[in-house]
Image (cartoon, coloured by chain):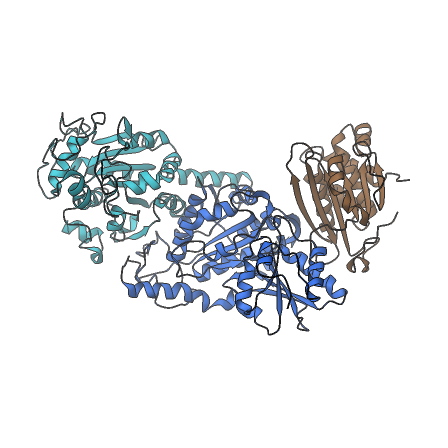
Amino acid sequence: MSGPAGGTAENKAPGRGNMPARSEILLSGFGGQGVVLAGRCLGTAATRAGFEATMLVSHGTETRGGYVRSQVVVALGEIDSPVVEKPDFFLALSQAAYNRFKPLAAFGLTLYDSQMVSPDGALPGRDLGLPARELARSRLGDELAANMISLGVILRLLGGVPLAEGQRAARELSKRGGETNVLALELGWNLDLG
Amino acid sequence: MLRLFDTGNRSVTEAAILCGLNFYSGYPITPATEIAENMSRRLPLAGGYYVQGEDETAALHMAVGASLGGMRAMTSTSGPGYVLYADPYGWAIGGEIPVVILNAQRVGPVSGITGAPGQGEFYLSRYPTHGGNFETIVLAPEGVREAFAMTVEAFRLSERFRTPVTILADQLVTDGWEAFEVPETREELESLGLPLPDRASHPGPDFYPDNTLIDVPPVVLGRGTGGACSDWTPTREGYDTEEIGEQMRHARRLVGKVLDNRGLIDRSESVCLDDDPRLVLVSYGSPSRTVRRAVREARARGLKVGAVRLRSLWPFQDKLFQAPGRDHLVVELNCDGQLVREVSRASGREARFLGRCGELPKVSELLEAVTLLLDGKKIDGGYWAEKHGGVFR
Amino acid sequence: MDRLFHKFLRARKIPSTACSGCGLGQVHKRVLLALERLDLGPDDVVWGTGIGCAGRQTFNTWRGDNFAGTHGRVYAIAAGLRVALGPGKKIVLTAGDGDAFGIGLKHLLNCARRNVDMTVVVADNLGYQSTGGQFGITTPRGSVTDSSPYGLNEPGWLGGGLDVLEILKAAGATYLARHLSLDGASSVESLVMALENPGFSLVHFIYPCVTHFGAVTLGERDKGKILGSFRAMFAGGGKGGPTDRDDGRGGETDGGGRKDPGPQAGSGPVSGDPAFRLKRGTYHDGRGLRPEFAASLIAWTKNVREGAGR
């Protein structure tokens, strides 16, 4: 699978490797799933790999159906708008987040945790269920590593940002389970997406 | 240069420390809390002092007090704390004491939504205290990287003009994340003019001179100069006076030192103005980034539009809006229309308005508005726009 | 005063603009006497003032460095200044009852909590006199003032079982004293202890306002007679007379050598609060018992920095 081509003029500009000039990534889930950490790892890895990166974090504070959203933009040059309006990648780790942001699914690839999310079959665009939580439990003994498995998938599909930079960032930024997160990234990166 | 991916709260902290910050006094408030947290972690390691005030009023008074003792000082807050700064803000203006203030605007009024951006303190930053007879200096970063640079500029301007400088940021600037560079080597530091020279101390006896010059050292107490600083109208030596002549002289200096030297303050960015487009979008802070993207996309579609971004807000840069035949669409993170009133005044024609509350306008919304306006149609600009007509002439 | 004046004060500010007969000058003089006792000069002291009679009349009188703060905030300013000044310089603040105990109380209490090295001299004229004589935080209940024409219907912090110094003590102040402005040597003694204390000290002087509180509330413009009334008001209804118990020097003379007029119960319309007994002299002495704010911040910061190997 190659990196998706966005619809804007800028996205059609030549990029690096598989990567377009600007990639928009929307990471979402509920609090405690490590959505922001995944975004920080992505942004840090991209920054060190020579890209520009931005991230906006927002929280829905409702106790039920709450969400955490991390809007990440990675680009070769200056980033004007940090807002993810047409995500090349949309990751949903929870049903509430999926439901809330699925109107944005039309623009790129939707990734969801197949254990946590029942996908909406009527959505336009491509989608892909990831057994992230299941793999995190069975292979790493830690369900919380689902975020990093998912990020490993995104990193590979994104192209341009090396796995090693993602792992370095995960090691530095994880308050706990740093080595587990390093393994999880690799697991995601190598996942057979069929 | 060390490349970091971090928040505006972090970039401001790092910049302030590189400026030689000695004293930070804060009070936790979303979305500026992380500046306080970062300061508490980083400042002691750099030999500076972190203090938490009992409230924002105390926090700024303490910072100004430390500055009066010769330290480089700053504080940070959001709207609910910025209003509580009124007292010490005025004191620092009148006493001509340097201090740097960051306001991470969130949507309001009052507590509003703590984690959502707003731009409700545009005018408050012009009139942050009572009494009049002053000009304020206000800078407005659009993102994390620029917040770093503007913090350095704020310290420099504050010292040179002997007055508080507000960095009027918003929640997306302070809590937003971005790649930015921090100088590491001596050469890199010096290229930014860092660290700033040590604070100077006025030798007296004319601490409040009868002119509008800048680069006059401020009063520093404890140096045996017989320095005096007060909330009262000062004589040249700093005595409290009730002479109207002295009051006029004081006001002339406070206003004049800023306006006469505004070339050092004025900052703006032009986007696609070379071919003199009829419609120009105007913004400051984080909305400027979606505006810039929208203008570029509009240009790619053959729509002749441009943008002006204000990087300094006060004193207001009237000249930017006086090109003949131009119409302005002002984009703000409020629905009452603040910047739009100044643009209308400066340009002499009523500007159009697109206000959003609590989140950035989307590029797609801006493109739609631009298209409608160029077609002579009305836009949904919010209540203020309805009252003032949404039609592009 | 001539000797003190030449040594410590600025010619430009003398004569003072205070009302003739105002008791503030006595308080001001006590502070200068204490500084002289400690051999402190203009370069050793930074002098700050609050808003109101006490602040305005003393601002920039000091021959050294001066500042006047916003109303009630001079304590917070002084806390920041304290860090910048470092040890070796004294901070003296002169302020009134409204500035210190009213609008500024929160900042005052937090300076006490932090034990910031400063000597706050509260010159209390029992209300808001510079604005024309309204009741304040320490005005006795029942007082007729310009804003309580039918008598003050709320308690002050000097009566009804309440004492503002008790609040400051609980907040962590390490030296507290109270005097009438006519107290001579005993009040200088208290001020010396306050100035020597490396921490938060407050000396509370009750002094006569002849123009408003005296004239309107007590019906009396004579400073001596007003002071006499104070003793009646604040000494359990006038019984027992002066209670300068800490040093047993009742019957002080003031700087002019006049004799303390003693209690004159009932000389005004306010008969005082029998529950409140004015104790003149040291109120609380906890000098050296708590770490000082700036010194400990500086030492702590140094430790953090060295701990991190920088």
Q: Quadrant of the C terminus of chain B?
A: bottom right
Left or right, C146 with reference to B386: left
Circle count: 0
Left or right, B103 with reference to A193: left
Image coords of residue A194 (percent x, y) = 91, 40
Q: Decide: is B71 above or below C226.
A: below
Image coords of residue A141 (percent x, y) = 78, 27
Q: Quadrant of the N terminus of chain B?
A: bottom right
User: Which residue is pictured at 42% across the width and 52% down the height?
Assistant: B89
Q: Residue furthest right?
A: A194
Q: Any idea which chain is the cyan one in this picture?
A: C
Closest to the observer, C153 or B162:
C153
User: Which residue is pictured at 43% across the width and 59% down the height?
Assistant: B162
Q: Any idea which chain is the brown one in this picture?
A: A
Image coords of residue A31 (percent x, y) = 68, 35
Q: Quick check: can you spot residue B214?
A: no
Q: Colour of chain B?
A: blue
Q: Quick check: can you spot residue B228?
A: yes
Quarter of the image where one finds residue B355 = bottom right
Left or right, A20 with reference to B356: right
Q: Decide: is B115 above or below B349.
A: above
Q: Decide: is A41 above or below C248.
A: below
Closest to the observer, B304 or B55:
B304
Image coords of residue B7 (percent x, y) = 62, 47
